[in-house]
Amino acid sequence: MSIGLGVALLFGSTTPAEAQPRGGGMMMGMGRLTEPDVSSKDIESYAALLSLTEEQKAAANELLLSYQQEFSALAEQVRQIRDGARQEFEETRDPAVWQDLMPRFEELGEEKKALESSFLEDFRLLLTPEQDALWPKLERMRRRDRTLSQGGIVSGETVDLFKVIEESKLSEETTAALSAVLEQYEMDLDRALIERNETYETGMARGMQNWRDQDFESMEENFAKARDAAIKLRDINRKYARQIEGLLPEESRAEFNRKFKEASFPRVYAKTYVTRAFEATDGFEDLTAEQREQIRAMREAYTRELNAINEKMAAAIEEGELTRGVRDMMGMGPGGGNEATREGREARRELDRATEEKLRALLTEEQQARLPERPSQNWREGGQREERTRRMGEREERPREL
């Protein structure tokens, strides 16, 4: 069974099966069974890590094709079972449907694991002794890629500093200088990740029964253990982010720090429309000297105020993560949300509104037309995700859905 389902059970997100006509979190967990564990992109990553020859890559892709054919048959079986369970529940409204589904769910999960293991065993036979010596490193990379993101109890738990570095677009020379610290980060992160995954698996095994028994005390105990394991991952990421930042050239530190914050608190530090509008004006060749100076001053003031608001929001979210329990996450606690977070969102919306208004007032109509398109504020209109993400209520105070 997937780590994602374990977290869902541990959090109680599958618990309202009686109240969710489509099976809620269990359906999301079932959806993971239709996602392959190996892809062509993975083969490319393995080839780069192990320095595969063209012949080895061709053989690996043949193995992948065979795996995909077998997996497609399994995925179709999963979909049929999923649809059958959903239809039965809609007809009977009997919560026992989801309880009966669990054993079948576990069997399918084991079949999926067996397909993955078979592929990896065959793939490993293609390697030379020198390449095979790197197998533990490949396993750590796979564990990060496959399971690190299947968390979310605390902000920063699911950050992968290898990806943050990649997105920071550092020079080859700078990246090479980080090799020693990244090697140690990889080892420390992997140990904590294994521990967290085992904790989630244990919670998964107990979570459904605890819910059926309405044993909230045990659920809270399991959740506390899971949170402690998640905090270890978060703290490792923060420790090594500080070390990496200290090794970077001065001109690269701000971007790395911004990317790390955005990865840790994506709904807080995601780039705003106003920031993108300011960036767009950098390419306006028809700005007067006076316009440029006013925009520069406005941008500095906006960034300063935005950073202050975001820091407060991140601190409030983190505080909530450390005090929240299972009942709170299931809507059974005192409620009320996090006042500091709500105030932060309101302050940010007002800052964005006022700053955009001032910026447009500085520009001619022709210049305004070259600003980025404003995202729709009405989700029914489709639009971009930015504004919808900004208006998701208390979602940033809760674990990400899995």
Image (cartoon, grey):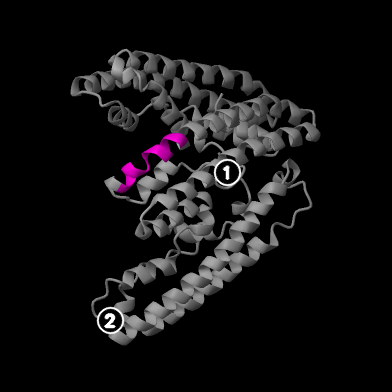
Q: Is residue 153 left or right of residue 173?
A: right
Magenta part, dominant SS? helix
24 or 109: which is nearer to us?
A: 109
Q: Number of callouts in the render?
A: 2
At a point 66% along the width and 35% down the height, the residue shown is 226
> Which residue appears farthest toward the left when viewing the image?
54
Report if residue 393 is visible in the image.
no
The residue pinned by badge 2 equals: 287
At a point 75% along the width and 29% down the height, the residue shown is 210
**Residue 149, position as x, y percentages in the image:** 50, 38
The residue pinned by badge 1 equals: 235
At a point 40% along the width and 84% down the height, the residue shown is 361
Counting other residues with Cα less than 10 Å from the Cα at mark 2, is it few (<14), some (14-19), or many (20 or more)? some
Magenta-tinted stretch: 174-184
Badge number at residue 343 = none
At a point 70% along the width and 45% down the height, the residue shown is 329
Counting other residues with Cα less than 10 Å from the Cα at mark 1, is it few (<14), some (14-19), or many (20 or more)? some
